[in-house]
Image (cartoon, rainbow, N blue to C red):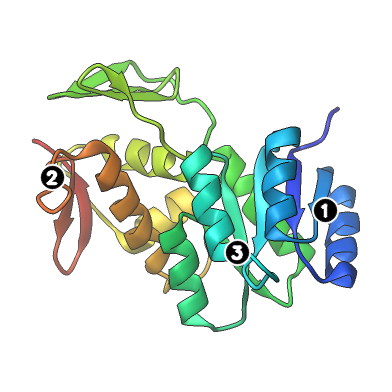
Amino acid sequence: MGPVARVLLVEDDESVRRALSLALGRHGHDIVEAASGEDGLAVLRAERPDIVVLDLMLPGMDGFEVCRRIRAEGDVPVVMLTARGDDLDVVGGLEAGADDYVTKPVRPRVLDARIRAVLRRGTPQQRPVETYRDLVIDRAALTVARNGRPVSLTPTELRLLLELSQSPGQVLSRQQLLRAVWEHDYLGDSRLVDNCVQRLRAKIESDPARPVFVQTVRGFGYRFGPV
């Protein structure tokens, strides 16, 4: 059986990088490494990994800028490594386009679980093609189109859209979405949901400030429309 995933690990601390590489290798992943943001982008283009594990505090080009460039170039998912309890790091990383985060010191078992959860978001679901106004969702092919043009979504954005659109009109709380999309046990972290909703709206809504498809239900959560 082949590796679970080809993982690009971008971490400037050599001891941390080597320890995580060895641990993730034992979990079945194929690891490629980079010690800086600039090297990370070069390795990304050369190696085409399935997922990037990215430290935010890098010398030179920091992790926020690296994440923005990764997101500008494609949809490879990003799990960021951040200092424990640093809300500014978490929010900044999510706004830059990260799919999930793990706090330092990193427990390899937790990081492996987050990697697998992100990759599972691309698992096909057997449902027909669905059309909502100018938005077309093909669950079998895992594609989304708007006005006849493909919409490029990250695995997390796609999984969020699939989860919301499974039951149009039904309100899903942030806690329900965290369980279903991110598979998180800690349910207090609604920032993951809110930032992903913002990114999704920017891609599928004609006017993200007046969303039609991903609607906010104040005090409760989100629902998929129009209904």
- Seen from the viewer's position, the closer of residues 61 and 216 is 61
Amino acid at pointer 2: Asp
Q: Quadrant of residue 220?
A: bottom left
Sequence-earlier tag: 2 or 3: 3
Q: Residue at x 54, y 60 (%)?
A: 65
Marks 1 and 2, how far apart at CA? 41 Å
Q: Quadrant of the N terminus?
A: top right
Residue at (88, 68) in percent of width and height:
14
Q: Nearer the viewer, residue 41 or 107?
A: 41
CA gap, disc 2 and disc 3: 30 Å
Give the side of residue 43 with respect to residue 188, left or right.
right
Q: Residues within 10 Å of mark 3 (few under 14, many from 20)?
A: many
- Residue ID for mark 2: 207
Sequence order check: which comes first, mark 1 or mark 2? 1
Q: Are the two marked residues, 1 and 3, in contact with CB atoms closer than 8 angstroms?
A: no
Q: Compared to 143, does 38 lie above or below?
A: below
Q: Of the numbered discs in the image, which one, if any, rests on residue 89?
A: none
Dot placed on the residue nearer the N-terminal end, 1 or 3: 1
Q: Position of residue 54 (x, y in %)?
A: 66, 59
Look at label 1 and name its amino acid: Leu
Q: What amino acid is at disc 3? A: Gly
Reading the image, the residue beneath label 3 is 63
Q: From the viewer's perspective, is residue 64 above or below residue 167?
A: below
Q: Quadrant of the C terminus?
A: top left
Residue 43 position, x and y percent, is 75, 43
Q: Which residue is mark 1?
A: 24
The secondary structure type at the circle numbered 1 is helix
Q: Quadrant of residue 165?
A: top left
**Mark-to-mark CA distance, 1 and 3:** 20 Å
